[in-house]
């Protein structure tokens, strides 16, 4: 079967590896892909926002399966349009993708399905929001309801800080995103990412991971897409995983089905593991990036078989198998990230890094120049990943690989995995 993968990040390079090694995959295409996916298949120039063009490409090339990596095409309804055209596609419908696209939708679903999450209230004016914060006290979380490029969440340690965030948002500091503000109870605990496959009715747990969102060592500096990850996350013990499935994932899946918008695809729960148990911070409707780069190297089951069972509604017959080893990935980003990353700086030494046992270097924002030189072409550029018996060993191996990469234009955190000891 010919497979088309949509996306161009480290997540997609990791997915491309798992798809290409499936006996069911006869040819792999990636749109737009990156130099990493080009080594596993064929990159194609295709405007993925033009759904008719994607359908036409699939028909011409005889594509049997489309796998969508990022959230934007899902929220835009690409899977709906492919399915309507009779082309099998992996990922939620536009209606089900609202679990990621709208904070208010997810909070309402949590209320309806009694999913543990932070208590919240919504405000459209500063004064009642200020009064609410004074009444509740700190710490407290102030969020702009709309998308605000990672700047929309303030975890305020003091009432003054929360009041300042409210004033900033209502005085237009975040533009339209701050016209409505959500004030949430501050959850205390350790964060973790939890992934499940859902076929509309049955949810099958995949694995846990832990991301590192801040740009700097010691979790300092601005938020990013993620600077590194490891899997499994020790904080998600088997008992915690069972509670996540029973109290969060399965009730949400049942509520989506009851609403007539069943969820099919990867459900990614952003969790806080609190003293009372796991609570949902947010849902995403796709694999995480960089979490996918530590999940795929651990996955032993054929990814294509899992994807087909998700589409066909037969997940109940499958149990994904995972390697016992841990995986850890260190993101190398271009200088300037998450602000304005420097493009076009040359990168060498990937082959030397991959000569280390268990190491894979996933490409994200890279570009191959006509003369063959690899250069940076984005914020997050490489995900240097190692598989080893323990997280500590995977960490040592990943940093050994990082140190073989000769890229003066890049930087990385040196402490990925610190919480895992
Ligand atoms: P979000 O954009 O909703 O994913 O939030 C970004 C980050 O803010 C999360 O990864 C958490 O670290 C933090 N955060 C969000 N909501 C809460 C909450 N209710 N309590 C504590 N931390 C939170
Ligand atoms: N690494 C977090 C995300 O993919 O949203």
Image: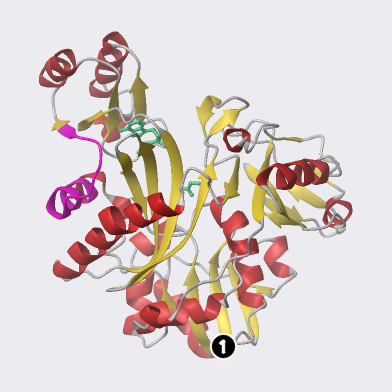
Q: Closer to the camera, 62 or 17?
A: 17
Q: Is residue 1 left or right of residue 350?
A: left
Quadrant assignment, res 399: top right
| Quarter residue 396 falls in | top right
Q: Is residue 130 visible?
A: yes
> Whole-percent x and y of residue 3?
56, 81
Q: Is residue 115 left or right of residue 329?
A: left
Residue picked out by circle 1? 61
Give the residue at x 33% y 67%. Answer: 77
State how many labels appear.
Answer: 1
Q: Secondary structure at mark 1?
A: helix
Q: Is residue 182 magenta?
A: no
Taking 269 as reference, is 266 above or below it?
below
* Quadrant holding the N terminus: bottom right
Comparing 90 with 301, the one in front is 301
Provide the residue span drawn in magenta: 106-121
Is 120 included in the stretch rendered in magenta?
Answer: yes
User: Residue at 29% of width from left, 73% of height from top?
Assistant: 200
Which is nearer the eye, 35 or 411? Answer: 411
In the image, ligand 1 is in what quadrant?
top left
Disc 1 residue crowd, few under 14, some 14–19, many 20+, Cα 10 Å: few
Q: Residue 116 vs residue 239: left or right? A: left
Query: In the rendered image, which quarter contains the C terminus?
Result: top right
**Rendering coords of residue 245 (x, y %):** 33, 58
Residue 272's spot in the image, x, y percent? 37, 39
Q: Specify whether residue 33 is in view.
A: no
């Amino acid at each position: 079967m010919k497979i088309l993968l949509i996306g161009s990040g480290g997540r997609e390079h990791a997915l491309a590896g798992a798809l290409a090694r499936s006996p069911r995959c006869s040819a792999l295409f990636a749109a737009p892909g990156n130099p990493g996916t080009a080594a596993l298949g064929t990159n194609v120039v295709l405007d993925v926002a033009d759904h008719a063009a994607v359908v036409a490409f699939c028909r011409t090339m005889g594509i049997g399966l489309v796998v969508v990596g990022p959230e934007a095409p899902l929220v835009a309804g690409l899977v709906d349009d492919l399915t309507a055209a009779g082309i099998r596609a992996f990922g939620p419908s536009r209606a089900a993708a609202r679990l990621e696209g709208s904070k208010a939708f997810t909070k309402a679903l949590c209320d309806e399905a009694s999913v543990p999450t932070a208590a919240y209230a919504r405000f459209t004016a500063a004064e009642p929001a200020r009064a609410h914060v004074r009444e509740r006290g700190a710490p407290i979380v102030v969020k702009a309801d709309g998308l605000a490029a990672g700047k929309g969440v303030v975890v305020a340690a003091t009432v003054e800080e929360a009041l300042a965030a409210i004033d900033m948002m209502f005085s237009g500091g975040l533009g339209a995103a701050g016209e409505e503000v959500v004030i949430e109870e501050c959850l205390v605990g350790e964060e973790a990412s939890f992934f499940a496959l859902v076929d509309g009715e049955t949810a099958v747990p995949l694995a846990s991971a832990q991301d590192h969102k801040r740009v700097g060592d010691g979790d300092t500096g601005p938020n990013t897409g993620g600077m590194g990850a490891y899997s499994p996350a020790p904080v998600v013990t088997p008992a915690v995983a069972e509670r996540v499935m029973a109290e969060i994932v399965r009730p949400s899946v049942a509520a989506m089905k009851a609403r007539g918008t069943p969820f099919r695809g990867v459900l990614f729960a952003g969790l806080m593991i609190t003293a009372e148990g796991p609570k949902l911070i947010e849902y995403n409707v796709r694999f995480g990036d960089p979490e996918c780069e530590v999940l795929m190297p651990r996955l032993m089951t054929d990814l294509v078989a899992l994807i087909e069972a998700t589409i066909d509604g037969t997940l109940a017959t499958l149990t994904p198998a995972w390697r016992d080893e841990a995986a850890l990935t260190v993101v190398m980003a271009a200088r300037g990230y998450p602000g304005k990353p420097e493009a076009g700086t040359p990168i060498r030494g990937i082959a030397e890094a991959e000569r280390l046992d268990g190491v894979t270097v996933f490409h994200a924002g890279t570009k191959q120049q006509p003369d063959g030189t690899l250069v940076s072409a984005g914020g997050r550029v490489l995900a240097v990943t190692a598989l080893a018996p323990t997280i500590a060993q995977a960490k040592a191996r990943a940093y050994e690989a990082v140190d073989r990469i000769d890229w003066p234009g890049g930087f990385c955190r040196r402490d990925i995995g610190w919480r895992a000891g």
